Amino acid sequence: MTASRGGVFVGCVLVLLLAIDPPTSLAEQLELSIGRLNYAGFSEKQHCTATLVAPQVALTARHCLVDDDVREMHLLLGYEGDDWREHLRPASAQFTALPGDIALLCLDQASTAEPIAIADRPAERGETLLVIGYGRPNVYVANRTSCRVLHVDAQGAFLLDCPLTPGASGAPVLRATDAGYEIVGVVSATNGDASVGYGIADQDGTAPCGPALPDN
């Protein structure tokens, strides 16, 4: 409608504002397939990080596993505070033929999240990689850390220039590609100056767990 004020017409326009969610970044999408691996219960202080690499397989550091029974562990994918995308339980663990601090968790059921691909080439000296893990002090959210590779040895271990913290053990070390992110390895150890990761470049590493278990 219009109104006249001193010979000047003022148009009244109704503007409809639509609430549109901002696009999700690739890193944010990754976090839905990365989870906090709790030793026992949902709020246990001790924890590591694990990543979905196949519908029923998660990758983590071998030293993160419970010695007596991995079935006591809980994997909360997309964990953020009191919320998470999916709660899964390891049924068993397998170890890759590659040397290093690496373990594959065979989950009790197939996940609905999108697995992250394993890289077909190892870390390279000088390249910049991304680590996403639940390190202290912000253990209730996935923390992103950019790291540069300082050294790679013949066994696939690599040194990163970024100090990490407890809870980031088992976190994926990720490379950005045109097709998205891929996993180069996992975080194994850290100090105040640098961190150590172990590479995994074998796509067959996800095979030992087999197909999804039938529903009970």
Image: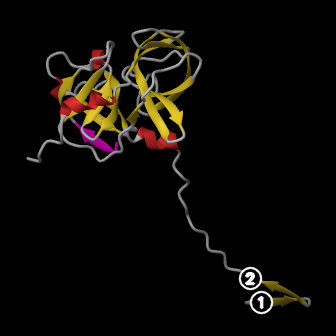
Q: Residue at x 44, y 39 (%)?
A: 30
In which quadrant is the N terminus drawn?
bottom right
> x, y (%) of residue 47?
32, 23
Q: Quadrant of the rendered structure where residue 147 is? A: top right
Q: Secondary structure at mark 1?
A: strand
The residue to which callout 1 is attached is: 2
Q: Is residue 150 above or below residue 89?
A: above
- Magenta residues, as a range? 82-88
Residue 87 highlighted magenta (yes or no): yes
Q: Residue at x 31, y 28 (%)?
A: 59
Would residue 90 be seen by someone viewing this image from the given angle?
no
Q: Is residue 97 above or below residue 36?
A: above
Q: Earlier in the sequence, mark 1 or mark 2?
A: 1
- Compared across the picture, whether 1 is left or right of 95 comes to right
Q: Are marks 1 and 2 in contact (CB under 8 Å)?
A: yes
The residue to which callout 2 is attached is: 12
> x, y (%) of residue 74?
24, 32
Q: Is residue 18 above or below residue 158?
A: below
Q: Secondary structure at mark 2?
A: loop
